[in-house]
Image (cartoon, helix red, strand yellow):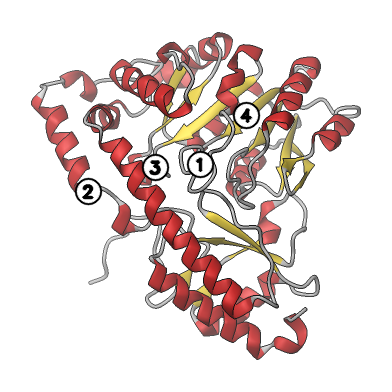
Protein backbone atom coordinates (compact mmCIF):
# COMPACT_ATOMS: atom_id res chain seq x y z
CA UNK A 1 0.00 0.00 0.00
CA UNK A 2 1.42 3.41 -0.97
CA UNK A 3 2.08 6.06 1.65
CA UNK A 4 -0.56 8.82 1.86
CA UNK A 5 0.57 12.15 0.44
CA UNK A 6 0.94 14.59 3.33
CA UNK A 7 3.87 16.79 2.31
CA UNK A 8 4.04 18.89 -0.85
CA UNK A 9 7.54 17.52 -1.23
CA UNK A 10 7.73 14.05 -2.76
CA UNK A 11 11.19 13.61 -4.27
CA UNK A 12 11.82 10.29 -6.05
CA UNK A 13 14.25 8.02 -4.17
CA UNK A 14 17.88 8.70 -5.03
CA UNK A 15 17.25 12.11 -6.65
CA UNK A 16 19.19 15.11 -5.36
CA UNK A 17 17.01 18.08 -6.18
CA UNK A 18 18.74 21.43 -5.69
CA UNK A 19 15.46 23.08 -6.65
CA UNK A 20 13.90 22.37 -3.24
CA UNK A 21 13.77 25.73 -1.44
CA UNK A 22 12.96 24.68 2.11
CA UNK A 23 14.85 23.52 5.19
CA UNK A 24 15.74 19.85 5.44
CA UNK A 25 13.47 17.61 7.47
CA UNK A 26 16.42 17.02 9.82
CA UNK A 27 16.31 20.71 10.79
CA UNK A 28 12.64 20.84 11.82
CA UNK A 29 12.44 21.16 15.64
CA UNK A 30 9.73 18.55 16.20
CA UNK A 31 10.39 17.99 19.90
CA UNK A 32 10.38 21.70 20.76
CA UNK A 33 7.17 22.19 18.78
CA UNK A 34 5.61 19.31 20.73
CA UNK A 35 6.64 20.93 24.01
CA UNK A 36 5.28 24.29 22.87
CA UNK A 37 1.97 22.59 22.00
CA UNK A 38 1.86 20.97 25.43
CA UNK A 39 2.49 24.38 26.96
CA UNK A 40 -0.35 25.93 24.96
CA UNK A 41 -2.78 23.16 25.93
CA UNK A 42 -1.77 23.32 29.60
CA UNK A 43 -2.93 26.93 29.73
CA UNK A 44 -6.46 25.82 28.85
CA UNK A 45 -6.81 28.42 26.12
CA UNK A 46 -10.01 27.36 24.35
CA UNK A 47 -10.04 30.66 22.45
CA UNK A 48 -7.38 29.30 20.09
CA UNK A 49 -10.00 26.82 18.84
CA UNK A 50 -12.41 29.61 18.00
CA UNK A 51 -12.50 32.09 15.12
CA UNK A 52 -9.45 34.28 15.58
CA UNK A 53 -9.10 38.01 16.16
CA UNK A 54 -8.89 39.62 12.71
CA UNK A 55 -5.41 41.08 13.10
CA UNK A 56 -4.08 37.87 14.61
CA UNK A 57 -3.49 36.38 18.04
CA UNK A 58 -2.44 39.25 20.32
CA UNK A 59 -0.21 36.98 22.39
CA UNK A 60 1.73 36.03 19.27
CA UNK A 61 1.89 39.62 18.05
CA UNK A 62 3.16 40.75 21.44
CA UNK A 63 6.00 38.25 21.68
CA UNK A 64 6.75 38.56 17.95
CA UNK A 65 7.03 42.35 18.28
CA UNK A 66 9.52 41.93 21.13
CA UNK A 67 11.46 39.28 19.21
CA UNK A 68 11.64 41.39 16.04
CA UNK A 69 12.60 44.51 18.00
CA UNK A 70 15.61 42.64 19.34
CA UNK A 71 16.51 41.03 16.01
CA UNK A 72 16.01 44.14 13.87
CA UNK A 73 17.50 46.55 16.44
CA UNK A 74 14.55 48.87 15.96
CA UNK A 75 11.20 49.21 17.78
CA UNK A 76 8.38 47.06 16.41
CA UNK A 77 4.83 47.83 17.54
CA UNK A 78 2.45 44.88 17.83
CA UNK A 79 -0.30 47.12 16.38
CA UNK A 80 1.65 47.19 13.11
CA UNK A 81 1.78 43.39 12.85
CA UNK A 82 -0.80 41.27 11.07
CA UNK A 83 -0.59 37.47 11.32
CA UNK A 84 -0.72 35.62 8.01
CA UNK A 85 -0.65 32.06 6.71
CA UNK A 86 2.77 32.85 5.25
CA UNK A 87 4.02 35.09 2.47
CA UNK A 88 2.02 33.40 -0.31
CA UNK A 89 -1.33 34.11 1.38
CA UNK A 90 -0.17 37.62 2.30
CA UNK A 91 0.61 38.35 -1.36
CA UNK A 92 -2.71 36.91 -2.46
CA UNK A 93 -4.66 39.03 0.05
CA UNK A 94 -2.77 42.20 -0.93
CA UNK A 95 -3.47 41.54 -4.60
CA UNK A 96 -7.15 40.97 -3.80
CA UNK A 97 -7.48 44.18 -1.81
CA UNK A 98 -5.31 46.56 -3.81
CA UNK A 99 -5.41 45.41 -7.43
CA UNK A 100 -7.83 44.46 -10.19
CA UNK A 101 -7.14 42.50 -13.40
CA UNK A 102 -5.03 44.54 -15.79
CA UNK A 103 -3.32 46.66 -13.14
CA UNK A 104 0.42 47.08 -13.46
CA UNK A 105 2.90 45.92 -10.84
CA UNK A 106 6.70 46.01 -10.86
CA UNK A 107 8.95 43.10 -9.96
CA UNK A 108 12.72 42.94 -9.89
CA UNK A 109 14.22 40.61 -12.45
CA UNK A 110 15.01 37.88 -11.64
CA UNK A 111 12.52 37.37 -8.82
CA UNK A 112 10.83 34.68 -6.74
CA UNK A 113 9.12 32.56 -9.37
CA UNK A 114 6.07 31.50 -7.33
CA UNK A 115 5.23 35.13 -6.59
CA UNK A 116 4.97 35.55 -10.37
CA UNK A 117 2.38 32.78 -10.43
CA UNK A 118 0.30 34.51 -7.75
CA UNK A 119 0.42 37.79 -9.68
CA UNK A 120 -0.56 35.96 -12.86
CA UNK A 121 -3.51 34.38 -11.06
CA UNK A 122 -4.75 37.92 -10.43
CA UNK A 123 -4.25 38.77 -14.12
CA UNK A 124 -1.85 41.60 -13.36
CA UNK A 125 0.42 43.28 -15.89
CA UNK A 126 3.89 42.35 -14.64
CA UNK A 127 6.71 44.74 -15.56
CA UNK A 128 10.31 43.79 -14.79
CA UNK A 129 12.86 46.16 -13.28
CA UNK A 130 16.53 45.42 -13.88
CA UNK A 131 18.94 44.20 -11.21
CA UNK A 132 22.72 44.22 -11.02
CA UNK A 133 25.28 42.91 -8.54
CA UNK A 134 23.76 45.21 -5.88
CA UNK A 135 20.13 44.32 -6.48
CA UNK A 136 17.29 46.35 -7.95
CA UNK A 137 18.57 49.20 -10.16
CA UNK A 138 16.91 52.41 -9.02
CA UNK A 139 17.75 54.19 -12.29
CA UNK A 140 15.77 51.60 -14.26
CA UNK A 141 12.92 51.89 -11.77
CA UNK A 142 12.89 55.65 -12.24
CA UNK A 143 12.83 55.28 -16.02
CA UNK A 144 9.94 52.80 -16.00
CA UNK A 145 7.96 55.09 -13.73
CA UNK A 146 7.89 57.66 -16.52
CA UNK A 147 5.52 55.49 -18.55
CA UNK A 148 3.95 53.05 -16.05
CA UNK A 149 1.80 53.59 -12.96
CA UNK A 150 2.35 50.53 -10.76
CA UNK A 151 0.16 49.65 -7.82
CA UNK A 152 3.15 48.15 -6.08
CA UNK A 153 6.76 47.04 -6.46
CA UNK A 154 7.54 43.52 -5.25
CA UNK A 155 11.10 42.97 -4.04
CA UNK A 156 13.08 40.37 -2.09
CA UNK A 157 15.66 42.84 -0.76
CA UNK A 158 17.88 40.64 1.40
CA UNK A 159 19.70 37.46 0.31
CA UNK A 160 17.40 37.54 -2.66
CA UNK A 161 15.63 34.52 -4.11
CA UNK A 162 17.18 33.46 -6.50
CA UNK A 163 20.38 35.56 -6.67
CA UNK A 164 21.39 35.84 -3.00
CA UNK A 165 22.03 39.59 -3.51
CA UNK A 166 21.24 42.13 -0.78
CA UNK A 167 19.97 45.62 -1.68
CA UNK A 168 22.12 48.33 -0.03
CA UNK A 169 20.65 50.99 2.23
CA UNK A 170 21.36 53.80 -0.24
CA UNK A 171 19.17 52.22 -2.92
CA UNK A 172 16.44 51.42 -0.41
CA UNK A 173 16.19 55.08 0.51
CA UNK A 174 15.91 56.09 -3.14
CA UNK A 175 13.22 53.48 -3.81
CA UNK A 176 11.18 54.65 -0.81
CA UNK A 177 11.36 58.26 -2.01
CA UNK A 178 10.19 57.15 -5.46
CA UNK A 179 7.30 55.22 -3.89
CA UNK A 180 6.22 58.37 -2.05
CA UNK A 181 6.55 60.52 -5.14
CA UNK A 182 4.72 58.20 -7.53
CA UNK A 183 2.23 56.72 -5.06
CA UNK A 184 2.99 52.99 -5.20
CA UNK A 185 3.55 50.49 -2.40
CA UNK A 186 6.78 48.59 -1.82
CA UNK A 187 6.03 44.99 -0.87
CA UNK A 188 9.26 43.77 0.70
CA UNK A 189 9.49 39.99 1.03
CA UNK A 190 12.01 39.76 3.88
CA UNK A 191 11.84 36.06 4.75
CA UNK A 192 15.66 35.74 4.81
CA UNK A 193 16.35 38.86 6.91
CA UNK A 194 17.26 36.78 9.99
CA UNK A 195 19.45 34.29 8.13
CA UNK A 196 22.75 36.16 7.82
CA UNK A 197 25.87 33.99 8.02
CA UNK A 198 28.81 36.35 7.49
CA UNK A 199 27.77 40.02 7.06
CA UNK A 200 24.72 41.55 8.70
CA UNK A 201 22.23 42.97 6.17
CA UNK A 202 20.91 46.56 6.27
CA UNK A 203 17.95 47.36 8.47
CA UNK A 204 14.79 45.80 7.05
CA UNK A 205 12.39 47.75 4.85
CA UNK A 206 10.15 47.79 7.92
CA UNK A 207 12.40 50.61 9.15
CA UNK A 208 10.73 52.79 6.47
CA UNK A 209 7.21 52.08 7.71
CA UNK A 210 6.66 55.77 8.51
CA UNK A 211 6.81 56.50 4.78
CA UNK A 212 3.33 55.01 4.50
CA UNK A 213 4.43 53.12 1.39
CA UNK A 214 6.14 50.01 2.78
CA UNK A 215 4.53 46.64 3.49
CA UNK A 216 7.07 44.16 4.87
CA UNK A 217 6.49 40.40 4.88
CA UNK A 218 8.02 37.78 7.15
CA UNK A 219 7.54 34.06 7.63
CA UNK A 220 8.24 31.24 10.04
CA UNK A 221 8.65 28.90 7.05
CA UNK A 222 12.36 29.68 6.64
CA UNK A 223 13.29 30.04 10.32
CA UNK A 224 11.08 27.41 11.96
CA UNK A 225 8.92 25.09 9.83
CA UNK A 226 6.94 25.67 6.61
CA UNK A 227 4.13 23.31 7.65
CA UNK A 228 3.07 25.74 10.37
CA UNK A 229 1.74 28.02 7.60
CA UNK A 230 2.39 31.07 9.71
CA UNK A 231 3.95 34.43 9.01
CA UNK A 232 3.45 38.13 9.50
CA UNK A 233 2.83 41.36 7.64
CA UNK A 234 4.32 44.60 8.96
CA UNK A 235 2.40 47.63 7.73
CA UNK A 236 1.26 51.20 8.55
CA UNK A 237 -2.21 51.86 10.07
CA UNK A 238 -4.13 52.54 6.82
CA UNK A 239 -3.02 49.19 5.38
CA UNK A 240 -3.84 47.46 8.66
CA UNK A 241 -7.33 48.95 8.65
CA UNK A 242 -7.90 47.71 5.10
CA UNK A 243 -6.70 44.22 5.97
CA UNK A 244 -8.66 43.74 9.15
CA UNK A 245 -11.94 44.89 7.63
CA UNK A 246 -11.82 42.69 4.53
CA UNK A 247 -14.55 40.13 3.85
CA UNK A 248 -12.20 37.16 4.16
CA UNK A 249 -11.44 37.94 7.80
CA UNK A 250 -14.95 39.04 8.69
CA UNK A 251 -16.12 35.63 7.49
CA UNK A 252 -13.32 33.36 8.69
CA UNK A 253 -11.69 35.34 11.47
CA UNK A 254 -7.98 35.89 11.96
CA UNK A 255 -5.59 33.51 10.23
CA UNK A 256 -4.33 30.38 11.96
CA UNK A 257 -5.15 31.12 15.63
CA UNK A 258 -4.46 27.54 16.75
CA UNK A 259 -0.90 27.43 15.39
CA UNK A 260 -0.38 30.98 16.65
CA UNK A 261 -0.93 29.81 20.22
CA UNK A 262 1.75 27.15 19.80
CA UNK A 263 4.32 29.44 18.18
CA UNK A 264 3.74 32.02 20.92
CA UNK A 265 5.04 29.52 23.46
CA UNK A 266 7.92 28.60 21.16
CA UNK A 267 9.05 32.23 21.03
CA UNK A 268 8.47 32.96 24.72
CA UNK A 269 10.53 29.91 25.70
CA UNK A 270 13.52 31.24 23.77
CA UNK A 271 13.46 28.33 21.33
CA UNK A 272 13.11 30.52 18.26
CA UNK A 273 16.31 32.40 19.11
CA UNK A 274 18.08 29.07 19.63
CA UNK A 275 16.65 27.63 16.42
CA UNK A 276 17.82 30.58 14.33
CA UNK A 277 21.33 30.34 15.79
CA UNK A 278 21.38 26.63 14.94
CA UNK A 279 20.09 27.25 11.41
CA UNK A 280 22.64 29.99 10.75
CA UNK A 281 25.49 27.71 11.73
CA UNK A 282 24.21 24.73 9.77
CA UNK A 283 23.29 26.71 6.65
CA UNK A 284 26.68 28.44 6.71
CA UNK A 285 28.39 25.03 6.76
CA UNK A 286 26.17 23.73 3.96
CA UNK A 287 26.77 26.82 1.85
CA UNK A 288 30.53 26.45 2.27
CA UNK A 289 30.35 22.79 1.26
CA UNK A 290 28.44 23.65 -1.90
CA UNK A 291 30.63 26.65 -2.78
CA UNK A 292 33.89 24.80 -2.22
CA UNK A 293 32.80 21.76 -4.20
CA UNK A 294 31.53 23.84 -7.11
CA UNK A 295 34.78 25.80 -7.20
CA UNK A 296 36.86 22.63 -7.10
CA UNK A 297 34.93 20.53 -9.61
CA UNK A 298 33.34 23.15 -11.89
CA UNK A 299 35.50 26.24 -11.53
CA UNK A 300 35.92 26.61 -15.28
CA UNK A 301 32.33 25.91 -16.23
CA UNK A 302 30.22 27.96 -13.84
CA UNK A 303 30.30 31.34 -12.10
CA UNK A 304 28.42 32.67 -9.09
CA UNK A 305 28.58 35.23 -6.30
CA UNK A 306 28.71 33.71 -2.82
CA UNK A 307 25.84 35.13 -0.74
CA UNK A 308 26.20 36.30 2.86
CA UNK A 309 23.01 34.51 3.90
CA UNK A 310 19.74 33.03 2.76
CA UNK A 311 19.22 29.74 0.93
CA UNK A 312 20.48 30.01 -2.65
CA UNK A 313 23.29 30.14 -5.17
CA UNK A 314 22.55 31.60 -8.60
CA UNK A 315 24.77 29.71 -11.04
CA UNK A 316 25.66 31.05 -14.48
CA UNK A 317 26.85 28.70 -17.22
CA UNK A 318 28.01 29.57 -20.74
CA UNK A 319 25.47 31.65 -22.66
CA UNK A 320 25.07 28.84 -25.19
CA UNK A 321 23.64 26.56 -22.51
CA UNK A 322 19.92 26.22 -21.91
CA UNK A 323 19.68 25.11 -18.27
CA UNK A 324 16.18 23.76 -18.81
CA UNK A 325 17.45 21.48 -21.57
CA UNK A 326 20.46 20.53 -19.47
CA UNK A 327 18.13 19.62 -16.61
CA UNK A 328 16.33 17.18 -18.90
CA UNK A 329 19.64 15.43 -19.48
CA UNK A 330 20.34 15.56 -15.73
CA UNK A 331 17.57 13.02 -15.13
CA UNK A 332 20.09 10.35 -16.12
CA UNK A 333 22.40 11.58 -13.36
CA UNK A 334 19.70 11.69 -10.65
CA UNK A 335 20.06 15.42 -10.12
CA UNK A 336 17.80 18.43 -10.66
CA UNK A 337 17.55 22.19 -10.07
CA UNK A 338 15.34 25.14 -11.01
CA UNK A 339 16.18 26.68 -14.39
CA UNK A 340 16.71 30.42 -14.50
CA UNK A 341 13.98 31.13 -17.04
CA UNK A 342 11.20 30.58 -14.45
CA UNK A 343 12.42 33.58 -12.43
CA UNK A 344 11.33 36.21 -14.95
CA UNK A 345 8.02 36.98 -16.71
CA UNK A 346 9.73 36.47 -20.09
CA UNK A 347 12.25 33.85 -21.19
CA UNK A 348 15.48 35.21 -19.76
CA UNK A 349 18.31 33.75 -17.72
CA UNK A 350 18.31 30.64 -19.92
CA UNK A 351 21.89 29.80 -18.90
CA UNK A 352 21.21 30.24 -15.17
CA UNK A 353 20.07 27.85 -12.47
CA UNK A 354 19.05 28.27 -8.84
CA UNK A 355 20.69 25.85 -6.44
CA UNK A 356 19.52 25.63 -2.81
CA UNK A 357 21.95 24.65 -0.04
CA UNK A 358 19.41 24.62 2.81
CA UNK A 359 17.63 21.33 2.22
CA UNK A 360 20.44 18.77 2.11
CA UNK A 361 23.35 18.09 4.43
CA UNK A 362 26.91 18.74 3.31
CA UNK A 363 27.58 15.14 2.27
CA UNK A 364 24.59 15.10 -0.07
CA UNK A 365 25.46 18.52 -1.48
CA UNK A 366 28.95 17.28 -2.32
CA UNK A 367 27.51 14.20 -4.02
CA UNK A 368 25.09 16.42 -5.95
CA UNK A 369 27.95 18.55 -7.28
CA UNK A 370 29.82 15.39 -8.29
CA UNK A 371 26.81 14.33 -10.35
CA UNK A 372 26.55 17.79 -11.89
CA UNK A 373 30.27 17.72 -12.71
CA UNK A 374 29.88 14.34 -14.38
CA UNK A 375 27.09 15.73 -16.53
CA UNK A 376 29.09 18.83 -17.43
CA UNK A 377 32.22 16.89 -18.27
CA UNK A 378 30.27 14.50 -20.47
CA UNK A 379 29.18 17.43 -22.65
CA UNK A 380 32.25 19.58 -22.06
CA UNK A 381 32.66 20.56 -25.69
CA UNK A 382 29.51 22.67 -25.54
CA UNK A 383 29.44 23.88 -21.96
CA UNK A 384 32.95 24.77 -20.87
CA UNK A 385 33.87 28.42 -21.34
Question: What separation in Å lies between label 1 and label 4 (alpha carbons)?
Answer: 15 Å
- What's the residue at 54%, 9% (across, down)? 237
Element under label 4?
A: strand
Residue 118 x/y as whole percent = 60, 41
Q: Is residue 69 above or below residue 343?
A: above
Residue 249 visible in rendering: yes
- What's the residue at 55%, 13% (across, down)? 242
Task: Please tell me how many numbered marks the rendered image carries.
Answer: 4
- What's the residue at 30%, 28% (across, down)? 260
Q: Quadrant of the C terminus?
A: bottom right
Residue 356 x/y as whole percent = 51, 60
Q: Is residue 205 left or right of residue 335?
A: right
Q: Of discs 2 and 3, which sits in the foreground?
A: 3
Question: What separation in Å lies between label 2 and label 3 (alpha carbons)?
Answer: 13 Å
Question: What separation in Å lies between label 1 and label 2 (alpha carbons)?
Answer: 21 Å
Q: Residues within 10 Å of mark 4 (few under 14, many from 20)?
A: many
- Name the mark on residue 291: none
Q: Quadrant of the N terminus?
A: bottom left
Identify the residue at the far front of this view. 199
Give 262 or 272, whichever is nearer the viewer.
272
Element under label 2?
A: helix
Residue 101 visible in rendering: no
Q: Residues within 10 Å of mark 2 (few under 14, many from 20)?
A: few
Question: What separation in Å lies between label 1 and label 3 (alpha carbons)?
Answer: 8 Å
- Name the mark on residue 223: 3
Question: Which residue is tagged 4?
Answer: 187
Amino acid sequence: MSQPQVSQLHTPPGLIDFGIGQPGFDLLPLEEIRQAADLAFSHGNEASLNYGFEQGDENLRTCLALFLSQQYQLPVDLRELFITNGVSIALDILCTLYTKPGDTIFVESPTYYLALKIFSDHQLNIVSVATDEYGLVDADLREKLTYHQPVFLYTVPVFQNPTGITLPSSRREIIVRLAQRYGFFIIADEVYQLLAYTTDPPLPFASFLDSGKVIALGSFSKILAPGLRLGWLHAPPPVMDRLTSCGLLESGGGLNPFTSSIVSGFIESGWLDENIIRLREEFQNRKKSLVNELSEQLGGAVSFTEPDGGYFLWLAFAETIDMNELRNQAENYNISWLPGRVFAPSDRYMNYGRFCFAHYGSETLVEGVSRLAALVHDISDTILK
